[in-house]
Image (cartoon, rainbow, N blue to C red):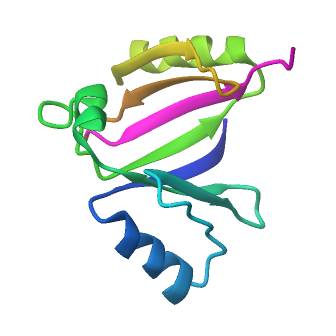
Amino acid sequence: MQIGAVTFFVNDMEKMVGFYRDVMKMEIEWDGGSFTGVRMENRVFFNLCQRNEGDKARFDYHERINGTMEISFGVPTPEDVDVEFERLVQAGATPVNQPVSQPYGLRDSAVADPEGNLIEIVAALPEE
């Protein structure tokens, strides 16, 4: 697996976009929505995602997940998402989201490490 993205879950999107765009000099474009990201020169995405009640329900922050950040690992094929998810769960990771094909062209899943940090496993779906 290779790191594909690092995502911070944030409380104040405008403030965080301003910090990373203006202070850290990252080329972040933001449309005012709940998610934005930038692909850096090393091809890794840096993302900001608005923390909200929907995210809390999706990731169950209160019981298992610390909910501060997520690291995303890319795998070569959509089938590898399923294989790696099962491998990580068998090795002791906590399952968070079962593998699912998303309408935006990715197959992803999520587990939590022993301290509750989110680990996403993702691959691009074949183009139709």
- Kindly give the residue lying farthest to the left in the view shown: 62
Residue 91 in sight from this viewpoint: no
Residue at horizontal 39 percent and vertical 70 percent from the top: 14
Most foreground residue, 59 or 17: 17
Question: Is 31 on the left-hand or right-hand side of 43?
Answer: left
- Kindly give the residue lying farthest to the front in the view shown: 32
Residue at horizontal 62 percent and vertical 19 percent from the top: 81
| Image vertical order of residue 128 relative to residue 62, above or below | above
Per the rendered image, the range of residues in magenta is: 116-128
The image quadrant of residue 31 is bottom right
The N terminus sits in image quarter: top right
Q: Residue 43 appears at what percent x and percent y?
A: 76, 56
Question: Is 33 on the left-hand or right-hand side of 52?
Answer: right
Residue at horizontal 66 percent and vertical 28 percent from the top: 104
The C terminus sits in image quarter: top right
Residue 127 in sight from this viewpoint: yes
- Kindly give the residue lying farthest to the right in the view shown: 128
Magenta highlight on residue 51: no
| Image vertical order of residue 100 relative to residue 30, above or below | above
Q: Residue 4 appears at what percent x and percent y?
A: 65, 46
Q: Residue 64 appears at what percent x and percent y?
A: 19, 31
| Image vertical order of residue 47 relative to residue 77, above or below | below
Q: Residue 126 appears at what percent x and percent y?
A: 83, 18
Most foreground residue, 121 or 7: 7
Question: Is 5 on the left-hand or right-hand side of 63?
Answer: right
